Image: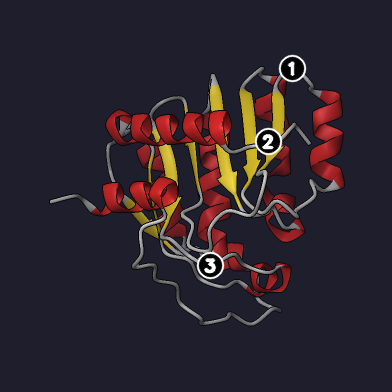
Amino acid sequence: MQSKFENEACATLLMNEGATMTNELLPAELSEFQLASMDYLETAQKCADEDLNFELGNKYLGHAQALFCIALRKSKSSFNIFTGRLPELFLKFIKDDLKAALNRKVKISIVFADASVEANNEILALKKECPESLRVFRFKKDFPQLTSHFFVADGKMYRIEEPHKPLTEEECHLGTQVPAIANFHDPSHAETLENIYKTICSEHVSMAV
């Protein structure tokens, strides 16, 4: 029997059915980052600092922002991102760590699953500043409706979402919840995602943005 991780990873590549996504929207005036409890953040940081193979469940935008930042700070060689879009609200929290990783010569690659999404000015500015370290691609055509977005870094760290329909910019800003799992030291599953990412890049992406 496949694990939850394997099912979700396969769904990214093979578009399996059975996606789940909550429709609860959080009030726009609340900071999602604040809603990620200190206990949760401390646990996540401990897992990263001590290279613990521990699965962290998460679903709030604040969780995603925090886990991205922690992984970016820990990254040493590579950081691959497969996403629908990087909304301004999300990028605002990770851009300093993203830039710091690029300045450390971490190779960062971003694939936008939505063929219509344009890289925003922040990403384009970083790409111009660090052309050897940052690559940005988009799909030749829109990715199938049920998609598991993920990042995978250094062959051991990852965060992968449950399959879900593409989110609009408004849904991203309202904080639509998408369940996900993350781990800061799981080379086996990270390798699976690395291979999926390589397949996506070799077979499905268009010219660099």
- Mark 2 closeness class: few <14, some 14–19, many ≥20 residues within 10 Å: many
> Badge 2 is on which residue?
98
Residue 16 x, y percent position in the rendering:
36, 58
Is 138 positioned to the left or the right of 194 in the image? Answer: right
**Residue kind at label 3, given as amino acid type:** Lys
User: Residue shown at 65%/27% (left/top)?
Assistant: 101
Colouring convention used in this rendered image of the protein: secondary structure
Q: SS at mark 2?
A: helix
Relative vertical location of residue 132 with respect to residue 86 in this rendering, above or below = above
**Residue kind at label 2, given as amino acid type:** Leu
Point out the frontmost of discs 2 and 3. Answer: 3
Rounded to the nearest whole Å, what is the CA distance between mark 1 and mark 2?
Answer: 14 Å
Q: SS at mark 3?
A: loop
- Mark 3 closeness class: few <14, some 14–19, many ≥20 residues within 10 Å: some
Residue 181 x, y percent position in the rendering:
37, 53
Q: Is residue 196 visible?
A: yes
> Badge 1 is on which residue?
132
Upstream in the sequence, badge 2 or badge 3? 2
Residue 95 x, y percent position in the rendering:
72, 42
Q: Looking at this view, is 96 or 85 the one in front?
A: 85
> Badge 3 is on which residue?
165
Upstream in the sequence, badge 1 or badge 3? 1
Is 143 positioned to the left or the right of 85 in the image? Answer: left
User: Residue shown at 57%/63% (left/top)?
Assistant: 61
Q: Is residue 50 visible?
A: no
Residue 154 x, y percent position in the rendering:
46, 25
